[in-house]
Structures are given as C-alpha cells and as structure tokens.
Image (spheres, rainbow, N blue to C red):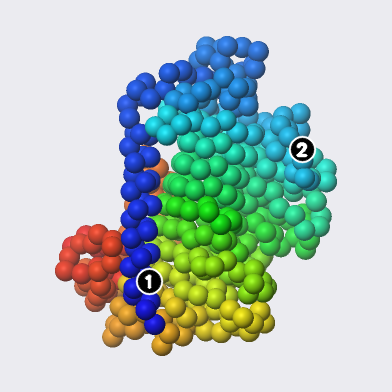
Amino acid sequence: MGVNKFYGLTVINSRLIQFAVLITIHFLLLPKGQLHSKEYYVAPNGDDLQSGTIESPFATIQKSQELAEPGDVVWLRGGTYSMQESQVRQKSRGRATVVHLDKSGHQGQLIRYWSFENEVPVFDFTALTPRGVRVTAFQVNGSYLHLRGIQVIGVQVTITGHTQSICFDNQGSHNVFEQLTMRDGQAIGFWLGRGSNNLVLNCDAYRNHDHTSEDGRGGNVDGFGFHVPKGSVGNIFRGCRAWFNSDDGFDLITTAEPVTIDSCWAFYNGFDPSFKSLADGSGFKAGGYARLPSSKIPSPLPRHTITHCLAVRNKAAGFYANHHPGGIDWISNTAYRNGANYNLLGRDLHNVDKDIDGHGHFMRNNLGYLGRREMINLNEAESDVSFNYFTLPVRVDASDFVSLDEAALILPRQDNGDLPESTFLRLANNSDLIDAGTTTDSPFKGKSPDLGAFESEQ
C-alpha cells in the first residue's frame, strides 16, 4: 500500500509548516515597542474624528486601518461595540462586509489588532440585518496581520433560502488569529477560504445556529471551516474549541489543499444547548467530495492531519472522513460518546454514487470510549492502522480515566489562552492504555506514547 511512506512525507511537510509558524511566532513575541512604530486606540465611546490616542480613541477598526502601517498596533478597548448597518464597508456579490481589513503588514512587521491588556472588546452584530445579502462581520484580505482577543456575537442571517453568514473570513496569508471568540449568532465562526501559512490559535466558536434560512436546522453553520483553492498551503488550526454549533465543529469539505488540526476540541455539535437535534453534527468532518465527479476532485488529493484532538458527544460522528476518496492521517485522538466515535466512510474515486469503506488512512495511538458505534466504514486491509484501541489487545472502560466529568470542556481558558487544564479523559495511573502506543513525530512521556489525545504525567 505504501501508506507509511506517504505518511513520512506528510510528517516532513508538517515539520516544515510548523517551522514556518515558529518563525512567525518568534517575531510576534518580541517585547512591546520593539516591533511597531505607532499605537492607535479604538473604544466603544470613541470618535473617528479624534486622534486615535488612548485619551482620544477612534470609534472603529476601519478608521484605525487607514493609518496603521507595518509594525503598528491597534489596541481595542473593552466593552460592547454595537454594529449598525451604516458601518457596512462594502456590498458586492450578494454580501455585506462590515469590517474589511485589506491593508497588509510585512514579514517581521505585522499589523496587530489586539485587545488592550485584560479588557474584552465585544463586537455585537445583532442589530445589523441588511436585507437580501449575506453578512461577513470581519473580512480579512490583508496578509501579515495578527488579530487577538476579539469577540464577535450575534451575526445575523436574513435570507430564507440557501445562504451563509460568517464571523471571520480569511483570504490573506501569514496571518495569526488568536483567542478569538465567535458565539451566539447565526453565522459560521471562522472561515479560512484562501491563503497560505495562516495560524488559527486558541479560538472558540460556540452556540451558533442559523434558524432563519431553509428549514431552520442550521445546516451551514460550522464552528470552523477550511475550504481553500489550490495553492493555499501551510495552514494550521491549533488549540481551538467548537461546541453547540448547529452543523459541524470543524468542516474540511471539498477543499483543494491539506490542513493540520492540532490539539482542538469539538463537542455537542449538531445540537442546540438543550440538546435538540439540528443539522449534521460531526466533530471533525475531515474531508469529502461526495457529489463531485472525479474530474473535479483535486490531484493530488488533500491528505489532512488530525492530531491530539478531542471529540465528545457530537450528534453524528466524532471523527468523520465524509466520503473522502483517499486517506487521512489520524494521530493520537480521543473520541467519547459520539454517534460514531470514528466513521471513515470513503467513496469510489471514479463513481460519484458509490460509497466504500475508507482506505489509505494512517492511524496511530487513537482512543475511543462509549460511542453508540465505535469504528465504522474502515477498510483495515487497505489502510495502516496499527497501535489503536480497536487493534490492540486492550479493553477500554471507565476505570481507565481519572474523570468523565464533561463540565471540564467549557472551563475558562488559561491566562495565556491555552485550553483549560483538567483531569477529564486523562488516563488513570493503572490504565493499560498508558505506553500502549507507538512513536510518531510527537513528543511523549514514558516508554512509549499513550493512547489518546493526552499524555499521562507518570
């Protein structure tokens, strides 16, 4: 099959991507004042006719962009920014774009749009309801930008037919989106539609449900979407959470290039907060070209990497290949209480109507427990799937875990934005799942990697 060899190439590419991201982060973490030459301030009580200082802040990000140059920082003061239709920056092709960031920084001199100190800027789009058009709250076409600590709430849908609104839409390259929150609206949280070497870091998308269009089930509202054309390479989602989104947590359908999803959590998707059933409801929908003829499927076929991720109680599947005609790399993931913990459904490359068991997958150190179904639709003979809970002589039960308390999933993030620390689904000291895995390119503790998304401390 040659799956191991192909996985080796994937690992090499992943390391190159992460090296590029680390170089970017190096520049971002330089001490305050070393990178930028000017500072501007935006506040809910500001005025765009003012000077943009901390004493006389602007009212809008759009005004600050007119003046910001590579290396500058725009500080967003805390409070609620009530967005109005008069603030729509652009209307074209059936879409109303509100905040339009199209000015770029440079390598080593990013333009930053950051929340100020420990304050929380909340951009509320509830009252912005332009008729007959889709809404994009933040359209990011520029490159070498860094957005951090921004909350977007209440983005609306006004079209009753097939449509979608978006909180953040990235079309640029070398951007960092950090500690963003997209919640309590009818829109997709974060949409990466184009661009290379972008990092989406420690972001949350939750309680988003389009109850207006089509049948009201919210079939287009994912927490995070990755849908790029050829040439948009090197993109990473890391440390992100998606929950109670009406469709899927993470959706990679019909994308032309691969992506890495690392250490992300998806839970309760496909439900509303009362657990009423809504749309599809997969945690990680990692692929899929179900309705495309073979002539329109990209070549080479994107091979995504899903690693150290957690899927809990998603309506349909925790981890789903979604009719992918080829393989995906699934490494050190944990699935718990999903409709199916792992569904590797594939399709025949040359027959749009023929679904088959998924083949070409590379799976290592994955763990599942208490799914209504565990592993389904996998062609093990035509995949490389050793050292997983369903291939090893191990038995998984409640005693393997320190805690099964799901309340830990929505604990506040750590001060640096990292996912919350807890004992949820961490392995108990006496578990035979500890050291039961095999080495990949990820660090581990002990003699060998543990099964699942989390390494035990012993």
Residue drawn 63% across and 40% down? 139
Residue at image x 76%, y 38%?
Answer: 91
**In the rendered image, which quarter contains the C terminus?**
bottom left
**Quarter of the figure that contains the N terminus:** bottom left
Does 221 sit above or below residue 61? Answer: below
x, y (%) of residue 352? 66, 79
Q: Please tell me how crowded label 2 is: few (under 14), some (14-19), or many (20+) other residues with Cα within 10 Å.
A: some
Which residue matches tag 2? 91
Determine which residue is flagged by label 1.
6
Viewer can see residue 327: yes
Query: Looking at the image, is mark 1 or mark 2 earlier in the sequence?
Result: 1
Q: Quadrant of residue 335?
A: bottom left
Task: Give the spatial CA distance, label 1 vs label 2.
Answer: 45 Å
Work out whether residue 315 can be spotted: no
Give the number of marks: 2
Instruction: Locate residue 73 relative to residue 222 in the image: left or right.
Output: left
**Residue 18, placed above or below residue 117:** below
**Rendering quarter of residue 425:** bottom left
Q: Please say if the residues under marks 1 and 2 sit with CB atoms less than 8 Å apart.
A: no
* Residue type of the residue flagged with mark 1: Phe
Left or right: residue 210 compared with residue 300: right
- The residue depicted at 34 percent of the width and 23 percent of the height is 34
- The relative height of residue 223 versus residue 431 in the rendered view (above or below) is above
Provide residue 148's location: percent of width, then percent of height. Answer: 48, 36
Residue that protrudes farthest toward the left in the picture: 447
Q: Secondary structure at mark 2?
A: strand
Whole-percent x, y for residue 264 in the image = 43, 57
- Residue, far bottom: 381
Residue at 20% over, 69% down:
448
Q: Indicate left or right for 430 with 3 as reference.
A: left
